[in-house]
Each structure stands twice: as C-alpha cells, then as structure tokens.
Image: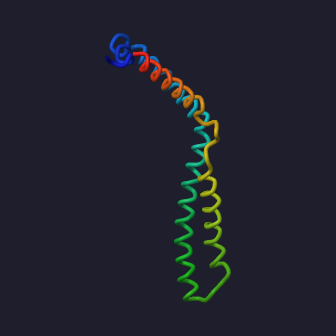
Amino acid sequence: MFHPIFSVLLRKPELVADHLSSYAGLVRDEARDVGSELAKRAVAGVLAAVCLLVFLVLAGVAAMLGAIAGFHWMLLVVPGVFLVIAIVAGLEAKKKLPNGAFKELRSQLNADAQALHTLGAQS
C-alpha cells in the first residue's frame, strides 16, 4: 500500500539519517574540489561589475571634460582600461564548470532514484 521507503522511515530512521549525512559529506567533498573554481569566478564577476561601474563614471567624466576642454587621447585611454578589464573579468566569470563537477554526486543520486523506482515497482 505504501512505498517501501515509508516503512524504512518509520522503522529505522537512523538509516535515513546516515544516508543523508553521507550525502552531505559527498557534497562537501565535491564542493571543496569545485569551490576554488567557483571562488575564482565569483571574484572575477565582482571585479567585472566594479570595473564596469568605474568605466561608466570615468566615461561620463571624460565626456564632460572633452566638452569643456577639448579632446585629448587620455580621455579615451583611462576609461578604456577599465572597460578592457571588465570584459576580460566578465569572460572569466562566465566560463562553465568542468564537466566532472559533482559527477559522483549525480551518479549517486541516479543510483538512489533507480533503487527507489525498483522498490516501488516491486510493491
């Protein structure tokens, strides 16, 4: 009548707790491996956003100075440096995670889902 997982939950909740703690350990281990890559991308994203804002401010100042004092090549170079940094950092932040990221966790989730389907079909 009920799915077999419910009977296990009622009779032996410590098994489910152990299984969930194993999942937490697996997530922690795989996140540690991928964490440095995620941190690098997060820093690159913040750097891109800050440099883009600095570019916008400096481009506005350069436009005002160019209108008042006349054109000078530095009015393009200074904001342009921040635009280039923002583009490079943005491209770095948009890179995809490696294909192997969380591979073991996905395979474990698929195995558990298959086991649950098998148990459900037997009952």
* In-image side of 81 versus 8 (left or right): right
- The percent position of residue 108, horizontal first and vertical second, equals 54, 26
User: Compared with residue 42, is residue 5 higher up or lower down, i.e. above or below?
Assistant: above
Residue that sits furthest to the top in the current view:
11
Which residue is at 63% across, 53% downward? Answer: 92
- The percent position of residue 58, horizontal first and vertical second, equals 56, 73
Query: Where's the N terminus, which quadrant?
Result: top left
- The percent position of residue 69, horizontal first and vertical second, equals 58, 88
**Number of marks in picture:** 0
User: Compared with residue 104, is residue 1 higher up or lower down, i.e. above or below?
Assistant: above
* In-image side of 37 versus 57 (left or right): right
* The quadrant where residue 37 appears: top right
Camera-side residue of 99 and 41: 99
- The percent position of residue 56, horizontal first and vertical second, equals 53, 71
Which residue is at 58% across, 34% downward? Answer: 102
Camera-side residue of 78 and 21: 21
Which residue is at 55% across, 49% downward? Answer: 42
Which residue is at 66% across, 84% downward? Answer: 72
* The quadrant where residue 6 appears: top left
Which color scheme is applied?
Answer: rainbow
User: Compared with residue 72, is residue 49 higher up or lower down, i.e. above or below?
Assistant: above
User: Compared with residue 3, is residue 63 higher up or lower down, i.e. above or below?
Assistant: below
Query: Where's the C terminus, which quadrant?
Result: top left
